Amino acid sequence: MSFLLDFLKKWLNFFTSAVEILIQRCLGCYDSELEAFRKSLKVEVDFESSEETCTTNPGHRNFIPITELKASHFPVKYQDQDLVDTVKSLGDVTVKINVSVLGRVKTGTGKIFCVTKDNSNCTCPCSDCRSSRNPRQTWWEIEVQTSTYVVKNITEARNSKCRLFYDTENSSLVSVEGFTVVKFSLNSENCRLICVTCDEELANRLNQLVDNFIVLYEKTFDKFWNPKKKEKLVIMVSHPHGASKKVSIGKTGKRIKVSKNYSALTYIIDTCPGSTGSYLYTL
């Protein structure tokens, strides 16, 4: 079973990262959002108070709190409890990323890809262990899939934290520290933020949540996937404006030529600053 889960993890990564290059088109505003993200840092603001001031997605009309998600939120042919369960499971492995840069905070979203026990015989590199006379010998790496616009180098990785289980504004504060970052390729906009923990209970819990998502993903994929469909459903779980998890539901757009060997599938879905790095669930 573990071999099958490892294979599915690798297959999911290949499917989301290599088969299609996805370019965000969020109500026609993504280009301006991305340019702003490149030029300046986004500081967290209160989600409700930003409704009227948000220039990317004024009004925040189509964000669904993940705890309130129901089958009726989806288009009629997708109104299925298995899909609701899968999206909520995706939420379980979705994290809010805060990166401290020059005294300000850059906020994004990521998805836990896998949890791996360290076998290097080194002590845990978390801040508590680094300052301890008795650092833990047993620790885990948590790989978080996100965007290079959120975490672009090792310096930013080591000044980052991932908040876990941030489902509502009343959720307890649980976080892990960033340690390093790995890019998929030299020119890729995707990366893996490697976080660390020596909390065995937390590591086991996260590992189980990743496995649960893979099982549910496969179930709904088999039920709904149709490669002949020209327009596909797109679902995103993110932390807009650094707030608690919200679900966005959209659709794929046109396919455009990026280069001689690559094309890109655009999509239309609501996002805001803080949504960058989110995993795109496409059916």
Image: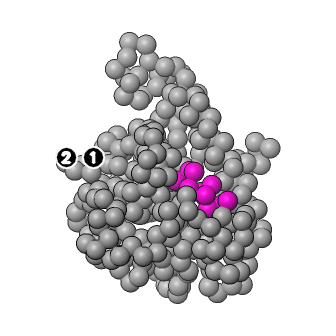
Q: How many marks?
A: 2
What residue occupies the far right of the structure in this picture?
Answer: 1
Bounds of the magenta span?
A: 85-95
For the residue pair 59 and 7, the one nearer the viewer reads as 59
Quarter of the rendering containing residue 32:
bottom left
Q: Which residue is drawn at 61% across and 58% down?
A: 88
The main secondary structure of the magenta stretch is: helix
For the residue pair 203 and 48, the one nearer the viewer reads as 48
Q: Is residue 190 above or below residue 272?
A: above
Q: Where is residue 231 in the image (x, y as percent from the top left)?
A: 62, 85
- Visible in this render: residue 127? yes
Quarter of the rendering containing residue 188:
bottom left
Instruction: Give the number of the disc on residue 103.
Output: 2
For the residue pair 137 and 14, the one nearer the viewer reads as 137
Q: Where is residue 19 in the image (x, y as percent from the top left)?
A: 60, 70
The verdict on residue 134 being magenta is no
Q: Position of residue 227 (x, y in %)?
A: 71, 79
Q: Which residue is drawn at 69% across and 49% down?
A: 212
Quarter of the picture containing the N terminus is: top right
Q: In this view, does 83 lie above or below 270?
A: above
Quarter of the picture containing the C terminus is: bottom right
Q: Report the amino acid beneath label 2.
A: Gly
Dots 2 and 1: beta carbons under 8 Å?
Answer: yes
Q: Which residue is drawn at 34% across and 64% down?
A: 48
Q: Which residue is drawn at 34% across and 20% down?
A: 131
Q: Position of residue 223 (x, y in %)?
A: 77, 70
CA separation in Å, label 2 and label 1: 6 Å
Reading the image, the residue beneath label 1 is: 100
What residue occupies the far top of the structure in this picture?
Answer: 133
- Visible in this render: residue 37? no
